[in-house]
Amino acid sequence: MLARRSILKSAVGTAALASLLQRDGFASTGLTHFAPKAKRVVYLFQSGGPSHLELFDEKPELKKLHGTELPDSIRQGQRLTGMTSGQSSFPVIAPKFGFQTFGDCGMRLSELLPHTGKVADEICLIRSMHTEAINHDPAITLIQTGSQQPGRPSLGAWASYGLGSEAEDLPAFLVLISHGSGRDANQGLLERLWGSGFLPSSHQGVKLRSSGDPVLYLTDPPGITRDLRRHMLDGMAQLNRRQLQTSGDPEIATRITQYEMAYRMQASVPDLIDLAKEPESTFQMYGEEAKKPGTFASNCLLTRRLLEKGVRFVQLFHRGWDQHGGLPTNIPKQCHDVDQPQAALIQDLKQRGMLEDTLIIWGGEFGRTVYGQGGLQADYGRDHHGRCFSMWMAGGGIKGGTVYGQTDDYGYNILQNPMHIHDLNATILHCIGMDHERLTFRYQGRDYRLTDIHGNVVQDLLAS
Amino acid sequence: MSHCICSRFVRPALSIVLIVIASKGLDAQVPDRISFNEHVRPILSNHCWSCHGRDDHGRQGNLRLDRRDAALLPGESGKVAIVPGKPDASHLVERILTHDADQLMPPDSAKRPLTDVQKQILQRWIEQGAEFSEHWAFVSPVRPEVPAVKTSDWATSPIDHFILHKLEAAGMKPSPQASPMIWLRRVTLDLTGLPPTLDEQTEFQTLLKTVPLAEAKSTTVDRLLGSSAYAEKMAMHWLDVARYADTNGYNNDEVRTMWPWRDWVIRSFAEGMPYDQFITEQLAGDLLPNATLSQKVATGFNRNHVLTTEGGIIEEEYHVEYVADRIHTTSTVFLALSLQCARCHDHKYDPFSQRDYYQMAAFFNNVPDRIVSYSQGRMAEPLLKVPTAEQQAELDRLNSRQSELENAIQERRRMADADIAQWEASLTEEDLQKSGVPGLAHHFTLDETDGSALERVDATANGKVNGPVTSVPGRVGAALKFDGQTYVESDNAGRFESDQAFSSSAWIQLTTSEASTILSRMDEGNAHRGYDVIMEGGKVAAHFVHHWPDKAFKVITDQTISQNEWHHIAVTYDGSRKADGVRVYVDGQLQKLTITTNNTLDGTLATEKQFHIGRRNSSAPFRGLIDDVQLFRSALSEDEVRKLASGESEGSLKALASIPRADRTDVQKQQIADYYLNFVDQKTRDLRKDLAEIPKKRSDIEVSIPVTMVMQEQPERRASYILRRGQYDQRGDQVTASIPAVFRELSSTAPDATNGQQPTRLDFAQWLTSPKHPLTARVAVNRWWEMLFGMGIVETSEDFGVQGALPSHPELLDWLACELVESGWDTRKILREIVLSATYGQSSHISPEQLELDPRNRLLGRGARYRLSAETVRDAALAVSGLLKQKVGGPSVKPYQPEGLWEDVSVERRDKYVPDDGDGLYRRSMYTFWKRTCPPPTMATFDAPDRETCVVRRARTNTPLQALILMNDPTYIEASRKLTEHVLLAEKDDAARWARAFRIVVAREPEADEIAALQSVKAAANDHFQKTPGAATELLKVGRAPADASIPAEELASWSAAMSVLMNLDEAISRE
């Protein structure tokens, strides 16, 4: 970037330089509005909508209510998806799994999440999340982009735009996908969930993949060695510099630095994903699954390594939570996928002194209905439920060992402290030092925000 | 529900202009003469109007600052905000200057304070009389005088006068002209998206030797504008704005077929269609008098939006979203206005009310938007079949062949009386015993035990049994057992039409009360098109469906039948398209029916799904036994059914024959004749056999005919409402179609409700293309200007509203707009004028002075230099390597793509990307299959938008991921090898080889040091490949195009490595 800086500096000053450079490369200056609590974000997204009733929101009354019809006073006639709106009866189904008390804080969590329970004191559990979307696409798009309809930048892109990048040879925003072992009937993911919308495309999430090239097109073609690549880049730089002299276009200087950054990535990324050097104790912590590329466990371990390298925003997607049927069979498998590694990630970051400035978020696009889809069945299912669901946060800026919000005895409506997705996103931005009302980007005459015209920072979640 | 934000809060934009002037004194930054549009409006709009603007709902203190008359009135406080000529008496001035934080405007909470310069501007504006003027973009352009300039020998076009005039005023000079070859590369890339070939370069150089430069350029531009590559390039830009894609987007993201529309766009540019017609056909081609197929296809423009097919979705909610997308796209693309901001409330800045929004929506909401399956994927109605010329010809041939055969059969019938009489006389008792019912079309006895299901009347309809074959003693001979897995399929049986009488009968023994299909020919995926006879809770039901449920009917018996006993079921239909035309018989008894769905069968029954016994196409399997299924090409009479049920059917011919010839009725004569012709007469049977093959042939073609989405008005106009907060279920006032009020005031050509008739999309299009329209022509020429200079005259090419950028050269914009209209909307004429201007021809070299005075080149004192678009980067590589396959149009193709990307994101990991073999790998990038949930990765990395919404202006970034693609994507490795092969074979000497490569890639001769640098890379590569056995061969295997075996592997590989360096140069991927 140096050549370009020197050319531009005299002409336009540093501030303008920053704005000119922002759209290029990985390096960019941040736009934080106040001192951030967290410098990095990890979003452990659980695609499909995990059931809050089985995992986070204990409802002892349901044992008694099992098989009874959901009262109209609870359902309140709100809209259902077309998958269950035709059902003639809505029998309440009690979760098959018990809850246990965890941590000094005494948090009640599912018996399916014993490892997560061990880090309960780091966690702020939110039981009063809500969304107005009732289908996957609009719901997941809303939670990731702040709008149910396509076209807006993703949370990670906003964070990249606002935070800039620390990593010299990695993108600011990386995406890792894993497929749940509960069942392969996954809902789709969409490129827009990590897209940059109308922000410059350099802010779009870059997928770190478990098969093929870890970053697309990272690997030199067969037959080309690092040495030869170096020769090629030197020759290229020489010719590009020559052209820069002739034409005076600062973009050429940028191009040269981008090729150098690419070259460094070619070395750093394989090194980063090579888990062979991790001691056995790491795998004891994250679990044996972490040795299998592409698993959630492996992605959690990679996340820690990415954070160490200065990546700002790591977005994981774990698929397979859309349990319209076979929930008791499948939810233990999904929990097994995520429980130990996510707890390990928190512990690992803590022991490295990184948890205090890393924000961790866990959750899906909505919860699930207390009534059974397809009636009362042993291997029951639950439909989508947006009126309440649970998420949790931990790390930088978050008050651990707390529970926020309360739902009714059916786990159907929120009784206390409703927290909308816009509130969640406002709070996330707050933790990383940004005022969600001031983090804007003008597009077609409008100053767009992640939180649209909504959102409040929920101070109760924040460590003082 | 999305809410538009129209935020009250804005981060102060980092404006270079402000920073440059920040070094000067305050007073020097405030213009002497204040222009409302240039200086005041941006301040009011950004800082004041969100609370004191045109939105009645959010207005504070009863103060409006968007209209002069209102701003001069006392506000809620009783004080007058603006007193013209008297800043000191103006309350506005007091409030922006006060040090009292409670009084200060804008308030701190708004987080958008005024700068000192802005405060000064407002004061000086009031001092000078506080004149308001209409926003420039809402006033029709008037052809301006071409300004006089001091430098007399520079301009080659009136365009240059406008540019030079401003440069001179700023004390700047234009740059020298770029060299002819740089100009040639620039104009070729700009107009065709491909670099000039060696031949084209030679041709241009030859031309330069014989004619003046201006003439050589002009000839070249004419050649380019006449090429199909030009049409493709123009279409390529249009695909972004029209959010074209090959899948539906959203969760399920199935395949759709919109490429016939894409090909229409290419064709329209190739034909030089006037821009007004280009707009009209896309918005309302279907409403033009005697609309052609092509004009209907054009309306696919408004159907390119995303479509959801997610289970459980609420249809009305998404219908509202689709209409919203049409408004967004139409207003952005043609008007460069953000009308979508008025969906939830009145627009905060531009003069559009929420009512305006929904009145405009009423033009575009009158389509069903109903999801249906078709052969390859799913789309929403209305759909249109678009046969190719070859397909149409083949269909025509089959139709005429069918008529021929039908005539021949008729002819045979007329001539057959003698033969019939002779045959009848020859009939033996045994013959009569064996004969079936007249009118019998198909007869499956289900007696086979080997998995076949022979059809006794027509061998072309023979079927087979799928699933377990269990033959058991039946009602007549053997019967087939159905256990939920077993079913019989036949291609050709049961092809009946809505207007045809037909009947079916079968013996069944039922073992369940679940829905069990006796027989069907039905496509559940296509709104259940077809028919069935199905047992539902022990009752006999029959569906006749063109489109369920609105073009369909269903009847069901009131009585149930017993299980585990044989029953004879018969259903007759008279071809009347009505439920009344159906009779159902159980064991020969006419049944009382309930009609549960009673619509007209308005449309075909035909489906390419097979005829089935024992299930629908994929659902409702039969459980029990079925025997002796018969289909008839007539509505059987009650008597005939009774005979079938009582086992007397074999006697029918016998019964007829027993009637003395003279006593027979016409119907009876007919029946005898039909029997003879259908079952005995070899001539007729041969003709019928040929005839029977035609539907299959026709359907083979029809299946392959592309089906595409179009606009087509519903007969009953859908009611339109203002939706409160934009919510689909919050209906307010009903509205009728109309253009926004601000344009009705400004224009006399506005479509409006006359004679109680609502205006149509065609009226809308005619208004949009009226010569005096303030926006249409300006928006178009601005977009072309952006295409040719990298930035529009109005930088925000998607927003000409008050929050958008002001034009850098307003008069030039108007001049071009007037030229466009007066030329008869001749796109090519405008492009030609621009690319032949001296402004366009300037060198793009940037001097330090230029960089300081005009870093963003807004005054155009130099040529533009920027990276090629995503598509062009790849197309250029394919072109220079000789791999490019130049075929125009057709279905989208699948070039190389890393494995697993579709599986990563698709529902149930079910979609898999399989690259094409052959030409599909090397077509222009605009033809690459565009899957919305997973767009082609290299396109997105080079800033192509995701095509989920309309995007007019792409970002232009410079990232390491781009470098990785150009270094390592097989596309580019293969291209560098193929280019290498070409230069190695074409030239002997290394210097000549490099010279040739440079000419091909960057259209210039190399300098000695450039050759030396590349030779050095090549030497290093050669060293490596010589030392490492097999490495060269490995490299040469990349890409499917075979390596030229005549060149030693090490030589080819080392040259290729160096060639890749040349192709990766910034110059190679930039237009200069």
Image: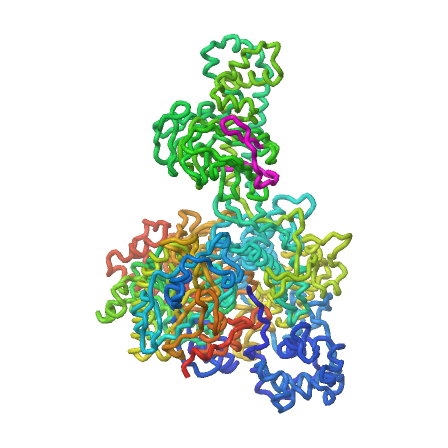
Q: What x and y, as percent, mark residue B982?
A: 40, 53
Farthest-out residue, left:
A280
Q: Quadrant of residue B55?
A: bottom right
Q: In which quarter of the image is residue B741?
A: bottom right
| Residue displayed at 64% across by 90% down | B98
Whether residue B908 is visible here, answered yes or no, is no
Whether residue A394 is visible here, answered yes or no, is yes
- Magenta span has B599? yes
Say left or right for A24 vs B840: left
- Magenta span has B402? no
| Depicted B388 relative to depicted A329: above or below | above
Q: Quadrant of residue B991?
A: bottom left
Viewer-closest of A418 and B279: A418
Q: What x and y, as percent, mark residue A38?
A: 40, 78
Say left or right for A176 vs B338: left
Q: What x and y, as percent, mark residue B137?
A: 68, 68
Q: How is the structure coloured here?
A: rainbow
In this rendering, the count of numbered labels is: 0
Farthest-out residue, bottom:
B99
Quadrant location of the N terminus of chain B?
A: bottom right
Viewer-closest of A174 and B366: B366
* Magenta-tinted stretch: B582-608
Say left or right for B431 vs B324: left
Viewer-closest of A2 and B899: B899
| Depicted A147 relative to depicted B385: above or below | below
Q: What x and y, as percent, mark residue B608?
A: 49, 37
Viewer-closest of A143 and B544: B544
